[in-house]
Image (cartoon, helix red, strand yellow):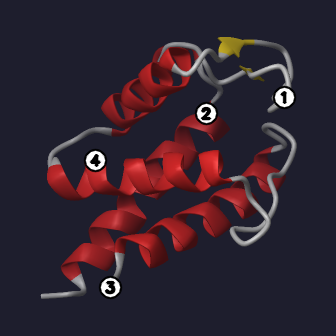
Amino acid sequence: MSTELTAKVCHEVNRVLTEFVKDVPVQASWEASSEDMRTSCISGVLLVQNTPNITAADLHAEWMKQRLEAGWTCGLIKSDTHKTHPALSPYEELPEGTKLKDKVFRAIVKAMVSGEE
């Protein structure tokens, strides 16, 4: 399965979870998402594929590092315009619903990779 298809599945499941846990505003579909959003998701997929024992906390830390390096800051609301996101906090401080998204993302990538064998 292609990395982009895996990223698309992760993204779409993340959209559903975001709505369910009332995390941040639900992002657009894969096709309507910004290139930045798609690139970030693909980067996460590659990280899990290349680091099989990565934890959800480590995955979050890497996402956070990339966002901070791109000029994002922690904010009360997610805003692409202002580059703010409430999940730009250490994993331990995140609400359980937000942690769940990292766990599910990792599980999807691992399942799709193992399905190739």
Q: Amino acid at mark 3?
A: Met
Residue 45 at least partly seen: yes
- The residue sitting at 69% across, 68% down in the picture is 30
- The residue sitting at 58% across, 56% down in the picture is 38
Q: Amino acid at mark 2?
A: Glu
- The residue sitting at 45% across, 72% down in the picture is 4
Secondary structure of residue under mark 1: loop
Where is residue 31, by image quadrant? Answer: bottom right
Secondary structure of residue under mark 3: loop
Q: Is residue 47 left or right of residue 50?
A: right
Query: Does label 1 or label 4 sit earlier along the sequence?
Result: 4
Q: Which residue is mark 3?
A: 1
Residue 52 at least partly seen: no
Label 1 and label 2: CA atoms lie apart by: 21 Å
Q: Is residue 100 left or right of residue 81?
A: left
- 60 vs 73, nearest the viewer: 73
Q: Position of residue 117 (x, y in %)?
A: 12, 88
Residue 79, numbered circle: 1
Residues packed near mark 4 inside 10 Å, few (<14), some (14 to 19) or many (20 plus):
some
Q: Position of residue 26 (x, y in %)?
A: 84, 51
Q: For the residues carrying marks 2 and 3, which lies nearer the camera in this image?
A: 3
Label 2 and label 3: CA atoms lie apart by: 30 Å
Secondary structure of residue under mark 4: helix
> Pointer 3 and pointer 1: residues touching (CB < 8 Å)?
no
Secondary structure of residue under mark 2: helix
Query: Does label 1 or label 2 sit earlier along the sequence?
Result: 1
Residue 47, numbered circle: 4
Image quadrant containing the N terminus? bottom left
Residues packed near mark 2 inside 10 Å, few (<14), some (14 to 19) or many (20 plus):
few
Query: Does label 4 or label 3 sit earlier along the sequence?
Result: 3
Label 4 and label 3: CA atoms lie apart by: 16 Å
Q: Amino acid at mark 4?
A: Leu
